[in-house]
Amino acid sequence: MSDDEIIAIAVSHRLGRTMKPIGMDTGDVFFTDASYRTDELLSFARAIEQEERQACANLCDELGQHWNDYKDTALLNGDVALSNAASGEPRAARAVKAAILARRQRID
């Protein structure tokens, strides 16, 4: 995640605010609100965790598609042995994605 994405989530969970410094062209500056409560901090942490888990799950989708394409290309080129050897990777990518998303549901 980028710093801007993390700051946007922090602001949406009322952990602080952003403002543009007067006379400076540096972009927004984040100020922490010292009065935030523990539940707001935990809510922020869960939101970050959810974003990161989803990014990992998306990567699993990309890897699974890559291996599907690789397997199909091998088969089209007549290399049945290579196609068969690569057939387990898409299933593995789907299993890893399911495990990542299931963990998110257990935590929530």
Image (cartoon, rainbow, N blue to C red):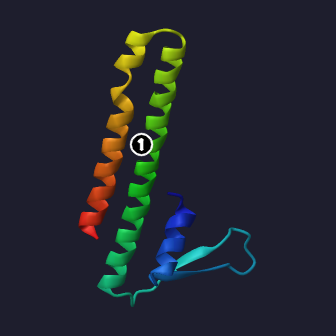
Measuring from the top left, give residue 63's x and y in whole percent: 45, 36
Question: Along the line of sight, which residue is nearer the eye, 104 or 19?
Answer: 104
The structure residue drawn at horizontal position 24% and vertical position 65%, both measured from the top left corner, is 106
Question: Along the line of sight, which residue is nearer the eye, 15 or 88?
Answer: 88
Left or right: residue 20 compared with residue 38: right
Q: Which of the 4 image quarters holds residue 37?
A: bottom left
Measuring from the top left, give residue 38's x and y in whole percent: 30, 83
Total numbered badges shown on the rendered structure: 1
Question: Along the line of sight, which residue is nearer the eye, 49 or 20?
Answer: 49
Q: Residue furthest bottom?
A: 35
Disc 1 on helix, strand or loop? helix
Q: Which of the 4 image quarters holds residue 64?
A: top left
Measuring from the top left, give residue 10's x and y in whole percent: 47, 75
The structure residue drawn at horizontal position 49% and vertical position 73%, both measured from the top left corner, is 9
Question: Along the line of sight, which residue is nearer the eye, 5 or 74?
Answer: 74
Q: Residue furthest left?
A: 106
The structure residue drawn at horizontal position 25% and vertical position 67%, both measured from the top left corner, is 107
Q: Quadrant of the C terminus?
A: bottom left
Local packing at callout 1 (Cα closer than 10 Å; few below 14, some 14-19, many 20+) is many
Measuring from the top left, give residue 91's x and y in whole percent: 34, 36
Left or right: residue 105 compared with residue 60: left
Would you name the residue on which mark 1 appears? 60
**Residue 87 vertical placement versus 43 (above, below):** above
Q: Which of the 4 image quarters holds residue 53?
A: bottom left
**Mark 1 is on which residue type?**
Cys
The structure residue drawn at horizontal position 46% and vertical position 9%, both measured from the top left corner, is 79
Left or right: residue 11 compared with residue 34: right
